[in-house]
Amino acid sequence: MKMLEKFFESILWNSRLFLIIAVFASVASSVLLIFLGTYDIILVFKKAFVAIGDYKYYETVQKEFLGKVIGAIDNYLISSVLLIFGLGLYELFISKIENAENDEKSSKILVVHSLDQLKDKIAKVVIMVLIVTFFKYSLTQKIWDMYNLLLLAIGTLLVSLALFFIGKKGGNGDDEH
């Protein structure tokens, strides 16, 4: 009976390794979003060179330029969320990343010791994504659609406040290793 229990516990413990699929998917998605954001920036540069000689064309595509640049920033921020999430899952459930721990040049943002730390790091970037999304939508809103923009701003503020108060109550997550 003891042998069966040890075998079952071994299977349960090793089942955590299935999270490697989520790690690979998160990191791959992060890389994809970096390429998509960079592609948007390249398109802006191509159109900008055309617009240099034609001011009327420039006036018509200026908002599009800003939208694409803000969209690229959005992609980069979401990419960083996915990277932090993927590496955090790996650190918490699979194995420590020795390179991240030992790198003296690193800011240690990708080093995760607890689920609370992972949550806090992701929450901060999500707030930035919400703020960038607000600015992206504010560029394209019509005067009669300002109500929706106001709701987005209020929603962003409420999420930010909730995360702020959760962070104040729960500490910074460094005490759990």
Image (tube, rainbow, N blue to C red):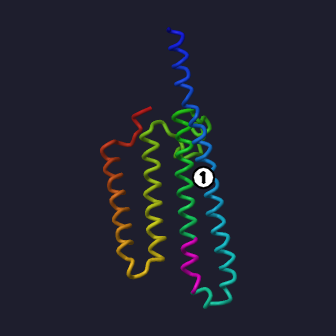
Q: Position of residue 151 (x, y in %)?
A: 35, 68
Q: Position of residue 95 (x, y in %)?
A: 57, 32
Q: Quadrant of the C terminus?
A: top left
Q: Which residue is situated farthest in the top direction here?
A: 1
Residue placed at 43% from the left, 51% from the top? Answer: 123
For the point 61% across and 91% down, which residue is it?
Answer: 56
How packed mark 1 is, by other alpha carbons closer than 10 Å (few <14, some 14-19, many 20 or more), is: many
Q: State the residue position of label 1.
A: 30
Q: Is residue 8 left or right of residue 174?
A: right
- Residue for point 44% across, 38% down: 115
The image position of residue 7, as x and y in percent, is 55, 16
Residue 172 as seen in the image, left or right of residue 34: left
Give the secondary structure at mark 1. Answer: helix
- Predominant SS along the magenta part: helix
- The verdict on residue 67 being magenta is yes
What are the residue bounds of the magenta stretch?
A: 60-68
Tell me the kind of residue under disc 1.
Answer: Ser
- Residue visible at 34% across and 62% down? 157
In the drawing, does residue 162 fall left or right of residue 28?
A: left
